Amino acid sequence: MNAQKNIMAKRYLGSTAIEIAEGIYWVGFYDKLSGLHCNPYLIVDGDEAVVIDSGSRPDFPIIMMKILQTGIAPAAINALIYQHYDPDLCGNVANFEDIIDRKDLIIISDGRNNMFIRHYSISSNLVSLHAINHCFMFSSGRELRFFNTPYAHSAGSFVTFDTKTGVLFTSDLFGSFGATWDVFQNLSPECRKCVTYTQCPEGRTYCPLPDILRFHKEIMPSGLALQYAIEQIEKIPATILAPQHGSVFSNQDDIAFLCSVLKSLKNVGIDGVIALHQDCQTHVSNPKMPGPVM
Ligand SMILES: [Fe+2]
Ligand SMILES: [Fe+2]
């Protein structure tokens, strides 16, 4: 039991909420054990607040504690935004509803997500992007705009752009696996020339790129879906990328480089499965040919 407690304590060790742009807080934690930690975000505008991809059920206490650290009362939250319907970002929706305790709380997502999100036992009004013209407006006039990124990775996946700060919340896009992690990540000019990402020319002990690329190969359904999503994102004047996994990127050259690498990534999702199958068949019919690369 003590060992279990120690594990939990280590898992929940971390910083306080971190302001990544004016009024926008990362309210996640460093989930060292899972190798895939989640990034919920809080947007505060005057006496109103919105939470984006609030997280999983077991993570609820630490996420709410970090929200409270910002000085925001739960009842100030008037909308919850879920950029798709996976449990790692929606699992605690019922906990949020309970603590916010507002009859006018709305849950915003794409209609194709809402038919799944309702199964998290929600009681609030589920609002589709279509119904609000892909835009949420705070009382101040500040707008959050929503852009669909279909099949990256769910049919109803979308990203959220804060027009005030330029922060783009990208959900699983630009996410990463990896136990080596920081809230912010910077690449260097050398990264843009690197070919293998295995031996860092600058002597860094950890290169974030293999984990980012592996994440997209495993989570996105196909190269076509990923390419289309990145093309939609390139049209948005984002200054900061805030993904639901991995790190925040704020360097414009890094953002352009990541878009370029992800747009041309090979063997994404089903593409990789088919390529491996074809390699296997080639090897079986002609054993002299090199075997498939696993
Ligand atoms: Fe997901
Ligand atoms: Fe996710």
Image (cartoon, rainbow, N blue to C red):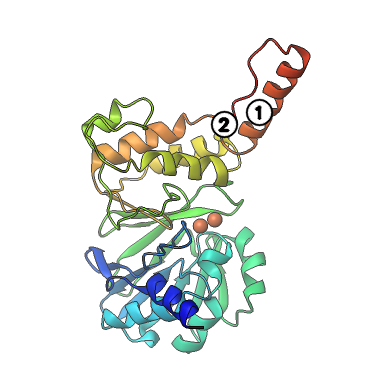
SS class of the residue under badge 1?
Answer: helix
Residue under label 2, please give it: 267
Give the answer, above or below, for where 141 lies relative to 240: below
Q: Position of residue 21 (x, y in %)?
A: 23, 61
- Which percent across, then down, holds residue 34? 48, 61
Q: Residue at x 35, y 76 (%)?
A: 49
Is 219 rendered above or below residue 103? above
Does label 2 or label 1 sit earlier along the sequence? 2
Q: Is residue 191 above or below residue 3?
A: above
| Residue on which disc 1 sits | 276
The quarter of the image holding the C terminus is top right
- The answer to whether the residues at label 2 and label 1 have Cβ atoms under 8 Å apart is yes
* Number of numbered markers: 2
Which of the 4 quarters of the picture holds residue 44? bottom left
Residue 237 or residue 154, whichever sits in front: 154
Residue 263 lies left or right of residue 144; in this view the side is right
Residue drawn 25% across the image and 49% down it: 250
From the viewer's perspective, tell me whether residue 44 is left or right of residue 292: left
Q: Marks 2/1: CA distance?
A: 9 Å
**Residue at 40% of width from left, 54% of height from top?**
179
Q: Label 1 neighbourhood size at 10 Å, few (<14), some (14-19), many (20+)?
A: some
Asked if residue 124 lies left or right of residue 278, the reply is left
